Image (tube, helix red, strand yellow):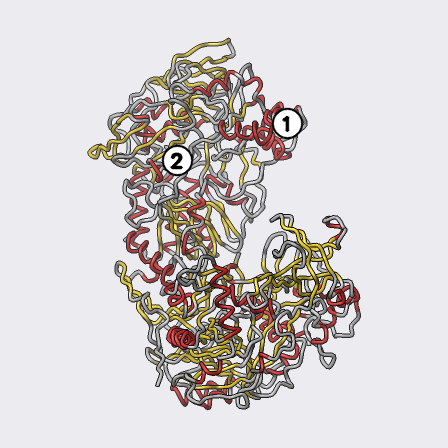
């Protein structure tokens, strides 16, 4: 598997560390309530299809990236810097 | 007066010559990590150019030449190799001394590419990875910086503590390449 | 037998070799199989289950029968296909799966017991009683099973791996692949052409047909010469693409040395390549399938295409009198080739009523072979014609049931092949692998002319541009066949030769309701041997379809998975044996510590000294006690460079630390150090350590050795993904500094002998930090303690590490102290109740460590919200305590569980567990830490400790975790 790092270009999957769903970028406010926090920390979708997920280019440039990947075909549609995703949502 | 003495990260490990390939210590001098603060990249670029005569390299590129290089080193990070950094740089960037943090070797020889093809998951052929190109990647299992500094010369850097592993892995690949001819 | 004037072997280069102890001669260019056939050897192996005598069946990597062991001793390589093994002078091969000899094999008695050993035999027989499994069934199965054996010695061979990149990967160098490579190469593309054979050309080397007006193999030579003249084309022979993986990544095994007699010269035996290609052309060809009939596994019965290959490529005929049996026109070429070479052909048997006639040979139309005789070598066949049965004496039967497109690689990403009624074969689904174009015979194009054209078209399609190349003239006959999978009749007709699966077994599976092809496969073991059913899966599933009343497309295929042909684990793991397994991280004091005799223990990737033994010390405990004494009574020195050090700079450095740690760092004064606790977002402890404020906007964070990487990643996540607006930069500085703990009452005395400006308690109080000059070298000093003693950590640039360590140890020894290792470090911190990852295991909270007050109420931090959850604040949770033994047994063991006195030592009564234990020479007893329900509220109570694993039981008293110097006076010196 290969991931197109927005900084380094196409790289082998072995350079990346997998974290999990990209919901981790959207941290709730401290007073958002138990449900929001439970959702943020624990509850994850497992779609048979497109999934936004966080990978860290740990053995490369060190960027955190959001990879949009199809969990059934492994096709990767998009890779964005986590920073850009966060800034766009702010 | 007591004295403590310096020892190179690759002391006793190099030089190595296997077949037509050589592995030698790259004596780069001071290594300084520069990470520009928010919005300060242009300022850093100018200061670097003025003080050290080098352009601030973009991603996957290195500027300068033997003795004084600026090597892109990761997201928002450049390593100045050679000159003592001028104090001005700290106005624009987090400046961290890394002179002792890296084991630096130079791999050279007509089949240097074939040696690295056994360890690095990147296309390092000259047509794709030209002089002045650099990459953060892995050498076997070790996170590394790989820079082409000549037609058949590569600068390889890994964390100092893993120097022995780097040389072990390279010497294995060099032996294989030499044997296959 | 060799045939004069035929073959691409070098008749001037004889090679001698041995098989089962006998010497034979072959020729350069031979495979072991062709050389054995040239010597009249037909019996080459025994089948897996019934030990039936078997001969070579194919001429390629799909070979199911002729598996041999090559070489001897530790370097012996089992299960080598004789059809793939190139001959070299001095080659030694032995047959497998027979005892005492290939000709007389005791376990062939299994064959007589066959009525009892059919499909599902294992499942039905090795059932009861359960206690028989380990002692009776498993040893029996293991002894009887397996083909070649390993030597049991470490593998002495060298394996290699590497990465290759290209624009276009062409898999297979037959007519299709050669044309694709030529077209793409001429168009300037970066082409990599790989083929599993030792020589490129594919079927063109095995057939007599002409291409472009010249013999096929000469046309191949010309194409190869042109390809070799193109700098943008690379060719690799003996390289099998074994797997297709995501993102244009391919696995490929190159057999580098199997054809050389030499070992140990540094050349690898095999290289496993990971190929990354922007696009690919699959030109894998097709595999000929058999027709099942009674005793169709007799040595001498083989693929018709293999007979032609042996004749045309290797100049060998597998028999003196050959008979051909087929259901398609292609089989007829076998007759023509043999006759042209002067080999006698007894008959052509064609199952089709409308089969064309062939001059010079007796043709039995609408006829089938129904039985074969000759246990160790074919002697005669029985055929069933429309007029009745007939017997023909023959020593070789060439069989063709048609060809299966080699679709395997197109299915590795999950696609299923599609059924083509026209050629009675599965063909690739279009777009099965992104970027891959299947072309030629593997795509159902069966004539040479169609293949040549398909190769050019595929190259253009893969590269996304128009490419036009003049096509040479070539055979373009229609491919006509009428499917026949098995000849009905009595007796056993074989499908999977390797696993001895018969037509009856497949029918029985269907009868017992194993109707899914995947179930049938597992019940009968059809296709589960090393050839993975390449020769038989198609027939088996067609028969299953018939037995279950379904069509072939509906029945479907089993799943094709990598590898296409077997790959040695040693090749996959090349470079990762021994020192290549994982990086070794050495501190600057490593060599000195080893010289001092210290056993080095792995802590993650790092190696750290366990203890520094002295003469007359009998056990590690003696050394450890002495080293603890250094720190408690004088001064000890320990390398702590492995702890993570992260440089944090920028206007928002303090904000980052306040957010990452539970406690405040924005209030820390410059020149001071503070202990910090870090949580995961779920409220559990992630790591702890000290952070020093070196300047207004400059901090250095320390992490534990184990968490250095994860903490760095975590801080990167915060700064990139949660708060990119913060102006802060983080840099790993772990490797820049060699850092040593100097601990004990005489620590300052020692340091003042080395510092250019001496320190005192006012200039350097507890938790102070600052720049210092150490013997003229710019360094850093931190007054922190992990032992409860007056202690410092001194850091210098790593190049000076070894020298400073030696000096510190020498000075410490002069003060009646010395170096201490991990064992002593552990005892010292347990005495003081300091936690490590033995305590913060990932399911422990700040509350559990009685550190809940460290979560600042004045700010948000990672993990704060979730740490407030009711369940995490339950006073009855297992919380940190100290433990000491009060029972008659004085030993405490880490990992032991705790129970209330009087309760049975069962899980339901569990009160907690012991995490860390050390012998305290200062207190002259074991000191321990652990977690107990209720925690510190239970200080003074007794609990029962039971270690079920080590069989230790005692009574412990719950005490304060700080068991030594509870007032904490020593640390302030």
Q: Residues within 10 Å of mark 2 (few under 14, many from 20)?
A: many
The location of residue B100, given as percent across then percent down, is 41, 76
Question: Looking at this view, is C797 or C745 the one in front?
Answer: C745
The location of residue C715, given as percent across then percent down, is 59, 73
Instruction: Say which quarter of the image contains residue A49.
Output: bottom right
The location of residue C844, given as percent across then percent down, is 68, 64
Left of C758 or right of it: where is C359? left
Query: Of the residues tagged 2 and 1, which is closer to the observer?
Result: 1
Is B62 drawn above or below residue C565 in the view shown? below
Q: Residues within 10 Å of mark 1 (few under 14, many from 20)?
A: few
Q: Are marks 2 and 1 in contact (CB under 8 Å)?
A: no
Is C379 drawn above or below residue B88 in the view shown? above
Q: Which mark is residue C292?
A: none
The verdict on a common chain for dots 2 and 1 is: yes
Is C117 drawn above or below residue C130 in the view shown? above
Q: Which residue is mark 2?
A: C80
Can you see residue A15? yes
Q: Which residue is mark 1?
A: C127
Question: Looking at this view, is C558 or C710 the one in front?
Answer: C710
């Amino acid at each position: 598997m290969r991931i197109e790092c927005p900084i380094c270009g196409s790289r082998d999957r072995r350079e990346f560390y997998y974290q999990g769903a990209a919901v981790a970028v959207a941290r709730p406010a401290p007073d958002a309530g138990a449900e929001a926090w439970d959702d943020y920390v624990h509850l994850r979708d497992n779609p048979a299809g497109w999934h936004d997920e966080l990978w860290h280019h740990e053995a490369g440039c060190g960027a955190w990236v959001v990879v949009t990947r199809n969990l059934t075909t492994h096709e990767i549609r998009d890779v964005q810097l986590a920073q850009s995703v966060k800034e766009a949502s702010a | 007066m007591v004295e403590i003495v310096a020892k190179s990260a690759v002391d006793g490990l190099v030089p190595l010559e296997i077949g037509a390939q050589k592995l030698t210590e790259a004596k780069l001098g001071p290594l300084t990590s520069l990470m520009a603060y928010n919005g300060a990249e242009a300022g850093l670029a100018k200061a670097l150019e003025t003080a050290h005569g080098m352009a601030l390299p973009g991603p996957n590129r290195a500027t300068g030449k033997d003795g004084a290089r600026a090597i892109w080193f990761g997201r928002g990070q450049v390593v100045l190799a050679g000159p003592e950094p001028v104090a001005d740089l700290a106005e624009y960037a987090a400046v961290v001394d890394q002179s002792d943090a890296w084991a630096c070797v130079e791999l050279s020889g007509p089949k240097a590419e074939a040696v690295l093809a056994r360890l690095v998951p990147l296309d390092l052929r000259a047509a794709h990875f030209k002089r002045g190109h650099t990459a953060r990647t892995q050498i076997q299992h070790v996170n590394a910086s790989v820079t082409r500094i000549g037609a058949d010369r590569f600068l390889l850097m890994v964390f100092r503590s893993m120097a022995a592993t780097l040389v072990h892995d390279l010497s294995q690949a060099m032996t294989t390449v030499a044997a296959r001819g | 037998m060799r045939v004069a004037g035929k073959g691409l072997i070098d008749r001037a280069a004889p090679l001698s070799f041995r098989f089962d102890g006998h010497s034979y001669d072959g020729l350069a260019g031979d495979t072991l199989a062709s050389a054995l056939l040239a010597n009249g050897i037909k019996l080459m192996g025994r089948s897996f289950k019934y030990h039936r005598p078997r001969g070579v069946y194919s001429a390629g990597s799909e070979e199911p029968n002729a598996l041999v062991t090559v070489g001897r001793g530790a370097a012996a390589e089992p299960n080598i296909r004789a059809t793939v093994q190139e001959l070299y002078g001095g080659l030694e091969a032995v047959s497998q799966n027979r005892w005492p000899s290939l000709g007389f094999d005791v376990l062939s008695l299994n064959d007589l017991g066959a009525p009892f050993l059919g499909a599902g035999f294992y499942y039905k027989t090795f059932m009861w009683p359960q206690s028989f499994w380990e002692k009776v069934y498993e040893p029996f199965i293991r002894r009887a099973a397996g083909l070649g054996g390993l030597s049991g010695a470490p593998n002495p061979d060298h394996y290699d791996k590497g990465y290759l990149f290209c624009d276009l990967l062409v898999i297979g160098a037959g007519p299709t692949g050669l044309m694709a490579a030529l077209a793409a190469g001429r168009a300037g593309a970066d082409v990599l052409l790989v083929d599993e054979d030792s020589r490129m050309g594919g079927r063109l080397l095995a057939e007599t047909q002409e291409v472009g007006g010249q013999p096929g193999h000469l046309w191949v030579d010309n194409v190869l010469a042109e390809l070799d003249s193109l700098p943008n084309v690379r060719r690799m022979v003996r390289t099998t693409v074994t797997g297709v993986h995501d993102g244009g990544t391919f696995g490929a095994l190159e057999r580098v040395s199997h054809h050389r007699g030499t070992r140990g010269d540094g050349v690898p035996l095999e290289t496993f390549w990971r190929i990354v290609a922007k696009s690919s052309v699959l030109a894998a060809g097709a595999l000929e399938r058999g027709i099942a009939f009674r005793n169709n596994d007799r040595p001498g019965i083989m693929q018709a295409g293999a007979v032609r290959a042996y004749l045309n490529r290797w100049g060998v005929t597998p028999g003196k009198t050959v008979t051909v049996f087929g259901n398609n026109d292609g089989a007829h070429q076998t007759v023509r080739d043999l006759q042209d070479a002067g080999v006698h052909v007894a008959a052509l048997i064609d199952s089709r009523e409308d089969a064309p006639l062939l001059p010079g040979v007796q043709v039995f139309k609408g006829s089938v072979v129904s039985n074969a005789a000759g246990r160790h070598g074919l002697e005669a066949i029985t055929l069933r014609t429309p007029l009745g049965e007939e017997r023909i004496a023959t020593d070789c039967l060439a069989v063709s049931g048609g060809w299966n497109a080699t679709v395997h690689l197109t299915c590795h990403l999950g696609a299923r092949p599609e059924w083509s009624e026209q050629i009675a074969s599965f063909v690739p689904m279009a777009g099965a692998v992104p970027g891959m174009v299947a072309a030629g015979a593997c795509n159902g194009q069966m004539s040479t002319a169609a293949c040549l054209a398909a190769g050019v078209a595929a190259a253009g399609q893969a590269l996304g541009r128009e490419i036009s190349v003049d096509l040479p003239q070539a055979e373009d006959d229609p491919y006509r066949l009428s499917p026949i999978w098995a000849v009905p009749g009595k007796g056993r007709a074989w499908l999977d030769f390797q696993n001895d699966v018969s037509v009856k077994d497949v029918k029985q599976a269907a009868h017992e309701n194993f109707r899914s092809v995947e179930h049938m496969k597992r019940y009968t073991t059809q296709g589960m041997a090393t050839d993975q059913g390449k020769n038989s899966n198609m027939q088996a599933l067609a028969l299953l379809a018939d037995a279950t009343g379904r069509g072939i497309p509906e029945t479907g295929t089993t799943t094709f998975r990598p590898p296409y042909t077997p790959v040695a684990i040693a090749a996959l793991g090349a470079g990762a044996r021994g020192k290549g397994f994982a990086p070794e991280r050495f501190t600057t004091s490593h060599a000195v510590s080893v010289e001092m005799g210290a056993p080095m223990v792995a802590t993650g990737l790092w190696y750290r000294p366990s203890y520094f033994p002295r003469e007359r010390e009998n056990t590690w405990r003696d050394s450890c006690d002495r080293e603890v004494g250094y720190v408690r009574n004088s001064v000890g020195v320990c390398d702590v460079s492995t702890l993570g050090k992260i440089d944090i700079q920028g206007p928002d450095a303090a904000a980052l630390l306040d957010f990452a740690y539970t406690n405040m760092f924005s209030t820390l004064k410059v020149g001071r150090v503070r202990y910090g606790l870090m949580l995961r977002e779920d409220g559990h402890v992630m790591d702890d350590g000290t952070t020093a404020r070196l300047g207004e906007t400059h901090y250095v964070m320390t992490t534990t050795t184990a968490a250095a990487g994860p903490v760095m990643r975590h801080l990167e996540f915060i700064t990139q993904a949660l708060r990119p607006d913060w102006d802060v930069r983080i840099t790993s500085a772990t490797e820049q500094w060699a850092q040593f703990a100097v601990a004990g009452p005489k620590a300052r005395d020692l340091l003042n002998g080395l510092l250019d400006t001496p320190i005192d308690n006012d200039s350097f109080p507890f938790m102070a930090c600052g720049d210092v000059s150490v013997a003229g070298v710019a360094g850093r000093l931190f007054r922190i303690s992990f032992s409860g003693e007056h202690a410092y950590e001194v850091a210098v640039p790593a190049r000076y590490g070894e020298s400073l360590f030696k000096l510190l140890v020498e000075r410490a020894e002069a003060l009646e102290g010395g170096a201490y290792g991990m064992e002593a470090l552990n005892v010292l911190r347990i005495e003081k109740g300091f936690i490590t990852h033995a305590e913060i295991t990932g399911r422990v909270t700040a509350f559990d460590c009685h550190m809940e007050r460290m979560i600042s109420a004045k700010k948000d931090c990672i993990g704060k919200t979730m740490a407030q959850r009711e369940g995490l604040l339950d006073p009855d949770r297992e919380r940190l305590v100290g433990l000491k033994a009060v029972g008659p047994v004085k030993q405490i063991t880490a990992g032991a569980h705790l129970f209330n006195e009087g309760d049975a030592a069962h899980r339901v009564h569990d009160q907690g567990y012991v995490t860390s234990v050390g012998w305290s020479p200062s207190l002259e007893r074991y000191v321990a830490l652990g977690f107990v329900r209720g925690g510190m509220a239970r200080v003074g109570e007794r609990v029962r400790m039971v270690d079920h694993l080590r069989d230790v039981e005692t009574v412990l008293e719950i005490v304060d975790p700080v068991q030594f110097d509870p007032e904490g006076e020593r640390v302030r010196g």
